[in-house]
Image (cartoon, helix red, strand yellow):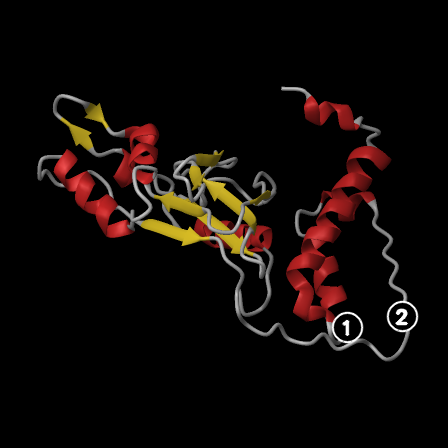
Amino acid sequence: MTLKGLAVGEMASRLNRLLVNLLPADMFCVASILEIHANGKNFTLWSGGLPRLAVKTPEQEIRLLIDPQHMPLGILEEHEFDNQTQYFETEWGDTLLLYTDGLMESHHKELGMLGEEGVEQWFTRSSQVNAQLLVDKAELYRAGAAAEDDITIVLFKSRPFQFKLPELLAEPIPFNLSFHLTAQHIKDAQVIDQVVAIVNSIPGLAAIRSELFTVITELTNNAIEHGILGLSSDLKAEP
């Protein structure tokens, strides 16, 4: 999916569609899908069911704590599923931490469960913290007892990527695209995917599929919420 240039929200939708049909009713998949932009400090995130993402500064202070906004994959049907993403920015030198429940659910017989706060304290204790160190500390915290769930840890230090981006080939013939959506189209959960597929058929635009998906999604949502339904933007500021 990354090779095809799918946006984060598209990946979440496709994975959910697959897992809804594949998994038994009592199973689901917690997941975070994180896109790192070329400058190394802008991120697009879809997260469902995992502990909150933490970002610390080079001075070992928490800069950001980002809670998951969605249910795990494989639970909601396509018309119920929300593929909206979160955008956030760090500074170069900041470190991101993502991990699964098994780490925070480490249990001490006297101190109780480690929890997100405990993980974040370990994370900010030293600039030398790595995944293996966190795994080892969790094992010591459990006094050698087996973890109750799997442990996966991802750390990333914000820095610009040193690679050459592909050159975009401009379409030599001027063109204009126009879409007319009826009520039936708007009710279709895949309408944005269909529009993006049409746009990406134009030579050169497939290279920026992820950006196009984000722009088209925002335009479509704004047209429905404000143009058709007449909703006020002030509603988003209310709890």
Q: Name the residue under label 2.
A: 175
Chain-order first, disc 1 or disc 2: 2
When the figure is inspected, residue 3 is found, relative to residue 37, above or below; the finding is below
The amino acid type found where label 1 is placed reads Ile
Q: Mark 1 points at which residue?
A: 202
Decide which of 16, 199 is in the foreground and name it.
Answer: 199
Q: Is residue 31 left or right of residue 90?
A: left
The amino acid type found where label 2 is placed reads Phe
Task: Tell me the tag on residue 98.
Answer: none
Mark 1 and mark 2 in contact? Answer it, CB < 8 Å: yes
Residue 94 in the image, given as x and y percentages of width and height: 46, 47
Give the Cα separation between the discs numbered 1 and 2. Answer: 10 Å
Q: In which quarter of the image is residue 148?
A: top left
Residue 182 in the image, given as x and y percentages of width and height: 84, 47
Q: Quadrant of residue 230?
A: top right
* Element class at badge 1: loop
Residue 103 in the image, given as x and y percentages of width and height: 27, 39
Q: Classify mark 2: residues with Cα within 10 Å, few (<14), some (14-19) or many (20+).
A: few
Instruction: State the residue at coordinates (76%, 24%).
Output: 234
Q: In this view, does 236 lie to the left or right of 7?
A: right
Instruction: State the residue at coordinates (15%, 41%).
Output: 139
Q: In this view, does 217 lie to the left or right of 162?
A: right
Instruction: State the residue at coordinates (71%, 58%).
Output: 212
